[in-house]
């Protein structure tokens, strides 16, 4: 059966030596050693003489082939057998050679690929950009957090540095502004009072960093003016060495996915109608493109800024994976229902850290902060009961949404983190008699171990004269 298998190789010519070798291999296959000893020698010009029958033991299979029968085969048949055997050998030789060359090529490619591969950011069977439907990752996943010190974090805690990570350290003042919800007047009034912009609404905070934690849109009618203004304000800030960072909120996600249940009816007119507004929030509109490029969570100066809150199962993926996951879900097949990153447990919606009992929230917060190499988390989304900035978990969670918008609570408040001089909250109130807005500035009881003002404030928190008040002229 072996010699009759077709060979894919086209055999052009077989020499006499190859024929002799093939014949010997054929004899060994059929077990005809007697035929080998009885095979006559002859020249090509004379026919072979008749061979003597070889003795063999009696057997019940009278029709079984014998060496004598094989030797008595016609010349043409013997010739075909010789060609088939030689073809088989040549075929096997070519196939073996091709396999060996292919193996060498694959080995060379794999070696080159491994040499050029950068540092791995995730292992254990899961890519850093992948998350399961419940937001979890597999056991043993090693994640790299690109923070100020470039540390590597895994299940077992800090590891060795994997390359030089980009710095996210801001050397000057950082301001954080919570939910705005369509109120341009209160936003400008607060920024002017805090010294971020002047009476013409131009940036004057020099090299400061302003972080807006999302939810500019909905409730009030001014989202178009605010989005366009913040793009202009960022340009002005960069010219002075400062910067404005916008984060995505859950209401941005709703509008990008065309969920308009919270849109002010008056706002449609500011866009030129519902159809034009939908176009502006699409991937073809300036606002839509800008919002789809925003991050959902960032770390500056060991502080995690995020709209609602970041649970450990997301933080362990790394912020790059979280931000990319949100952007992916807000793409062409945009939907906030049943989504992972933009769903109710994602960074745009979840209130577990902000509202659940501290016995539950604080351990989760600690896990998140460890995963992203941060000391504190600043969130908006959940309106504080006091209308001012509130702290949880020994100051590790800072809630900055006091309800700024007149369409929510009309309580503008801003966080100010002074480089080397502590944390402060600034809020506006209107004098009942003069109707003039008054800016209050108060230190927060947050200490990073290097700010005397915050340490002193921990001793006097709650005293009547602990804040400064300034009357603000209307813009």
Image: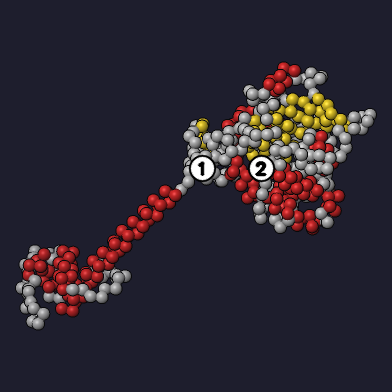
Could you tell me which quadrant the C terminus lies in?
Answer: top right
Q: Residue at x 66, y 55 (%)?
A: 332
Q: Quadrant of residue 277?
A: bottom right
Q: Which residue is mark 2?
A: 296
Q: Residue at x 26, y 75 (%)?
A: 12
Residue 343 lies, in percent from the top left, at 67, 44
Residue 247 lies, in percent from the top left, at 69, 42
Task: Return the residue found at the far right.
Answer: 433
Q: Residue at x 77, y 37 (%)?
A: 196
Relative to residue 39, is residue 232 drawn left or right?
right
Q: Kindly tell me whether residue 178 is visible in this rendering.
A: no
Relative to residue 324, is residue 271 drawn left or right?
right
Mark 1 closeness class: few <14, some 14–19, many ≥20 residues within 10 Å: some
Q: Secondary structure at mark 1?
A: loop
Q: Quadrant of residue 374?
A: top right
Up the image or down, 22 lies above or below 475; here it is below
Q: Which residue is mark 1?
A: 121
Mark 1 to mark 2: distance in Å?
Answer: 20 Å
């Amino acid at each position: 059966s072996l010699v009759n298998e077709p060979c894919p190789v086209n055999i052009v010519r077989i020499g006499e030596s190859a024929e002799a070798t093939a014949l010997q291999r054929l004899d060994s296959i059929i077990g005809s050693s007697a035929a080998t000893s009885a095979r006559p020698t002859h020249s090509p010009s004379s026919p072979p003489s008749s061979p003597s029958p070889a003795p063999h033991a009696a057997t019940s299979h009278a029709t079984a082939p014998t060496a004598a029968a094989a030797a008595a085969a016609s010349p043409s048949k013997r010739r075909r057998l010789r060609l088939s055997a030689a073809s088989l050998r040549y075929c096997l030789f070519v196939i073996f050679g091709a396999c060996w060359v292919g193996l060498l090529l694959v080995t060379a490619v794999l070696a080159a690929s491994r040499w050029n591969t950068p540092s791995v950011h995730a292992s254990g069977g899961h890519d850093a950009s992948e998350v399961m439907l419940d937001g979890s990752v597999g056991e043993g996943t090693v994640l790299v957090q690109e923070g100020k010190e470039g540390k590597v974090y895994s299940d077992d805690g800090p590891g060795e540095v994997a390359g030089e990570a980009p710095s996210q350290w801001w050397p000057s003042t950082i301001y954080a502004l919570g939910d705005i919800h369509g109120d341009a007047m209160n936003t400008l009034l607060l920024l002017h009072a805090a010294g971020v912009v002047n009476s013409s609404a131009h940036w004057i905070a020099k090299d400061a960093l302003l972080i807006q934690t999302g939810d500019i849109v909905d409730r009030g009618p001014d989202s178009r003016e605010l989005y366009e203004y913040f793009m202009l304000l960022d340009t002005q800030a960069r010219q002075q060495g400062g910067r404005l960072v916008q984060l995505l909120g859950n209401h941005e996600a709703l509008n990008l996915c065309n969920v308009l249940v919270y849109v002010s009816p008056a706002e449609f007119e500011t866009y030129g109608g519902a159809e034009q507004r939908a176009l502006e929030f699409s991937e073809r509109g300036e606002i839509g493109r800008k919002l789809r490029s925003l991050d959902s969570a960032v770390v500056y100066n060991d502080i995690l800024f995020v709209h609602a809150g970041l649970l450990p199962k997301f933080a362990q993926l790394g912020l790059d994976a979280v931000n990319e996951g949100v952007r992916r879900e807000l793409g062409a097949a945009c939907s906030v229902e049943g989504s992972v990153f933009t769903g109710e447990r994602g960074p745009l919606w979840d209130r577990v850290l902000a509202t659940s009992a501290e016995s539950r929230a604080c351990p989760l917060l600690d896990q998140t902060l460890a995963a992203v190499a941060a000391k504190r988390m600043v969130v908006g989304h959940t309106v504080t009961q006091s209308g001012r900035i509130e702290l949880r978990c020994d100051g590790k969670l800072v809630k900055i949404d006091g309800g700024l918008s007149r369409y929510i609570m009309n309580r503008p408040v801003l966080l100010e983190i002074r480089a080397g001089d502590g944390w402060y909250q600034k809020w506006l109130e209107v004098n009942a008699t003069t109707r003039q807005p008054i800016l209050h500035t108060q230190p927060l009881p947050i200490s990073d171990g290097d700010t005397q003002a915050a340490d002193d404030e921990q001793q006097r928190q709650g005293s009547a004269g602990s804040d400064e008040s300034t009357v603000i002229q209307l813009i």
